[in-house]
Amino acid sequence: MKFGIALGSNLGDRAENMQRGVELLMARVPGIRLNASARVYETEPVDCAPGTQAFLNTVIEVAAECTPEELHEHLKAIEQALGRPEQRERNSPRTLDLDLLYADDVVSDDPVLTLPHPRMHLRRFVLEPLADIRPELVLPGQKVTVAELLANLE
């Protein structure tokens, strides 16, 4: 199964946090393969407190023989291993944020794991790096490609 994962960091050594997150992911998930990695973007915080430091954001695509729920559990464990508290305010600063964007054509309305990610089509900091690696991707529930979603943003 192919998975898209967004990475973001705005605390500490942001680039190192993201690199370490990818390394831990590759070490934790048996048989995982990195298919593609977008370039890293520095982006202004969205819906965060005033004075919040800029984020580094990117997207990777991996292939793994696991369920989306299993991969999601790995992502949450990696966030915690790198210092992100389990209980936190929404949009608070973070050492590492790992969001599962899509899992092939899986659609899920589960409150713990909604797929595809419910707000990704509205977020330049996700669509821009995703368009680097999968511009032709049409996400479940969308009628246009990632590149077209990006072009249609304000």
Image (cartoon, rainbow, N blue to C red):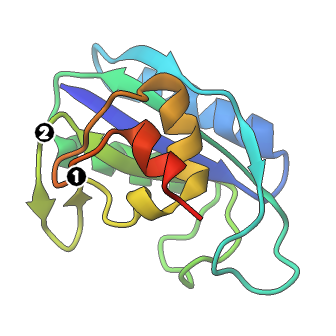
Above/below status of 24 relative to 63: below
Residues packed near mark 1 inside 10 Å, few (<14), some (14 to 19) or many (20 plus): few
For the image, the number of numbered tags is 2
Q: Which mark is residue 105?
A: 2
* Residue at screen point 36% across, 23% down: 62
Above/below status of 108 relative to 73: below
Q: Give the structural element (helix, strand or loop) at label 1.
A: loop
Picture quadrant where residue 95 is located: bottom right
Residue 1: percent from left, percent from top: 18, 25
Frontmost residue, 24 versus 22: 22
For badge 1, the amino acid type reads: Gln
Residue 47: percent from left, percent from top: 63, 80
In the displayed structure image, the side of residue 92 where residue 68 appears, left or right: left
* Residue at screen point 45% across, 38% down: 147
For badge 2, the amino acid type reads: Asp
Residue 138: percent from left, percent from top: 26, 38
Residue 59 in view: no
